[in-house]
Image (cartoon, coloured by chain):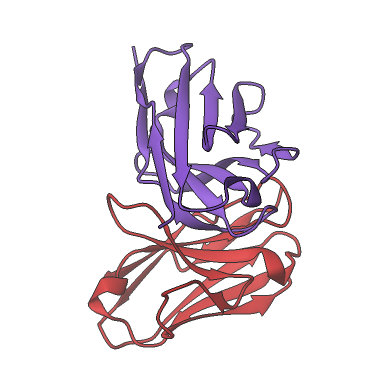
Chain colours: A red, B purple
Amino acid sequence: EIVLTQSPGTLSLSPGERATLSCRASQSVSSSYLAWYQQKPGQAPRLLIYGTSNRATGIPDRFSGSGSGTDFTLTISRLEPEDFAVYYCQQYGSSPFTFGPGAKVDIK
Amino acid sequence: EVQLVESGGGLVQPGGSLRLSCAASGFTFSSYSVNWVRLAPGKGLEWISYISGGGATIYYADSVKGRFTVSRDRAEKSLYLQMNGLRDEDTAVYYCARGMSSGRSGGDYWGQGTLVTVSS
């Protein structure tokens, strides 16, 4: 099983600042099979990035993804008020299609 | 418009069974895989099952293997998650999520979720 670790667990930032979230895998993940999601309380998750760096439909370009092998990054270039949420990475290259534990971006 | 609507959640005693449904609309049903994902109280997302577009490939998380069974009905355009031997730790909101292809992929459309509570 591929274990995903996210860091930091919580990121306290102000609107307008840059957020950098890390996702590290216990073994190599094909870049085609790494996604990032955003979830807010009481809502379903929302796909942000798939295949490491491809923005999903309707996702603003302030969200970007990068990485390869075992290290992946989600960057939010300038935080908007609606971006404060929990973010998860997921690998779907090999079963089980594991999620990371989540990283909370909250308002400083 | 792509829509996924889960139903079938509720309160069940430990050891009991439930069948969740996920009604799909707005897309060619057999062309897309579907995953089931759950969110337990105070926890993070947990992937629990995958079924390919044609239904030939199925995967389960170890935590539900042997207890949960996923299936899909092309005529009904629905997915099902049969859950047997339910445990307290299965208490969660259960989501179905459409993949972006018939194979392995992230979930681009999600249902609103259905709450399963396992308690005596």
For residue A23, which quarter of the picture? bottom right
Compared to A53, does B30 lie above or below?
above
Compared to A48, does B101 lie above or below?
above
Closer to the camera, A14 or B106? B106
Q: Position of residue A82 (x, y in %)?
A: 26, 72
Work out which residue is located at the far front of the displayed protein and give it: B75
Closer to the camera, A18 or A57? A57
Taking the spot 39% from the left edge, 12% from the top edge, the residue there is B13
Taking the spot 62% from the left edge, 48% from the top edge, the residue there is B33
Q: How many marks?
A: 0
Q: Specify whether A98 is left or right of A75.
A: right
Q: Position of residue B14 (x, y in %)?
A: 43, 13
- Residue A60 visible in the shown view: yes
Placement of the C terminus of chain A among the 4 image quadrants? bottom left
Q: Specify whether B97 is left or right of A45.
A: right
For residue A26, which quarter of the picture? bottom right
- Residue A107 visible in the shown view: no
Q: Position of residue B6 (x, y in %)?
A: 40, 37
Closer to the camera, B76 or A107? B76
Q: Position of residue B24 (x, y in %)?
A: 47, 43
Compared to B93, does A6 lie above or below?
below
Taking the spot 50% from the left edge, 49% from the top edge, the residue there is B97
For residue B101, which quarter of the picture? bottom right
Q: Specify whether A13 is left or right of A73.
A: left
Taking the spot 66% from the left edge, 22% from the top edge, the residue there is B66
